[in-house]
Amino acid sequence: MNTSDVLYVAGKHLDGLRGHSFDVLELAKPVSPEAAVNLTKIVSKLSPLVGNLLEFNTCEYLNELPDFNGLGRWHRQDPGFPDTVFRGDVTPTPGFEIKAWFPLATEITARFKDSQRSFGQGNTFVALLAWLPESLIFGKPSIVDIVIVSGASVAKARDDHYHNPPGYIVIEPYDTAARTANLQQTNTAGYIFQGTEKEFEAARAFVESWGRAGRIYSPDHSYQLLLAQLMANFSYRLDTNFAKIDRIRHVEIEKFKTRVHRSIVHGRSVHNWKQIFSLHGRDSVANVLSETFGIGEGPVGSVVE
């Protein structure tokens, strides 16, 4: 197999994880409707932990497959990009950047900052896994849906969405190829103009002097030099919300989000469950959870063994 074959085969297996649970963590069934309501408020806080566990176990899952016997093994890079790579007799090295999403949260909180320059060989894909506990707010993590897209397409969609000089500019990392792996930089950054209206007009004239293609983003060194001049002459601030996957308007990811929100989980769409948890009163939420999952009042002390 070559790089494309490895990514295709692994992607097919990952795609087959829909509906499967991971035995990495299990939330106990709430002992009362009131406890269930409280759990709806905090279960999303487990998302970073469960996300990391899913990423680790996805790597282990791929290594259990016979398809890659004799070719190599999947390894976690922590830290490193991408976070899951195939090391063996295949070059360039295939890899997946795995992101987990808890769809009862407000948005996909994962970020994707890596430069377009990191994807020139087409050997890195992004796997976005939507998960929920088996019983919505308790049980083991279960995969609701998954989408796999090329890393290059995500990086380009991000830059095309954000970059709009002089109001907003995307800056590439410095060339750190000569550094050791743990010191290399691959992350882009977004900056927002914060000067006066008069300064903005001057900045716009400066950008217009670059020609018709001046507003089109490029990671190339020559274009980045122009952006550096812009930043040197005008005031910009770092955008701390830059590169959230939920906001970059990648076509396939947007379809995935819609698909997940329409997915039926325990008789209701994910979107409907979100509305119930966010818009209904505590008594209403308690009644729905009690009826759906058979949650009654437990005996005193039942939460402690």
Image: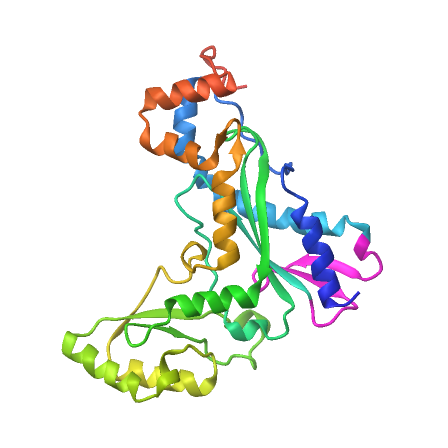
The answer to whether residue 260 is seen in the rendering is yes
The type of colouring in the image is rainbow
| Position of residue 96 measured from the top left corner of the image (x, y, whole percent) | 62, 59
The residue at the far top in this view is 299
Residue drawn 14% across the image and 79% down it: 198
| Position of residue 295 measured from the top left corner of the image (x, y, whole percent) | 48, 17
| 300, above or below 24, in the image | above
Count of numbered labels shown in the rendering: 0
Q: Is residue 252 left or right of residue 204?
A: right
Look at the image and say whether residue 275 sits in the magenta stretch.
no
| Position of residue 156 measured from the top left corner of the image (x, y, whole percent) | 49, 69
| 96, above or below 229, in the image | above
Quadrant for the N terminus, please.
bottom right
The answer to whether residue 31 is seen in the rendering is no
Residue in the foreground of this view, choosing between 174 and 288: 288
Residues in magenta?
Answer: 67-93
Residue drawn 45% across the image and 35% down it: 43
* The quarter of the displayed image where residue 37 is located: top left
Look at the image and say whether residue 85 sits in the magenta stretch.
yes
The residue at the far right in this view is 70
Residue in the foreground of this view, choosing between 201 and 100: 201
| Position of residue 305 measured from the top left corner of the image (x, y, whole percent) | 55, 19
Q: Is residue 68 left or right of residue 108?
A: right
Residue drawn 42% across the image and 31% down it: 40
Q: Is residue 143 left or right of residue 225?
A: right
| 31, above or below 199, in the image | above
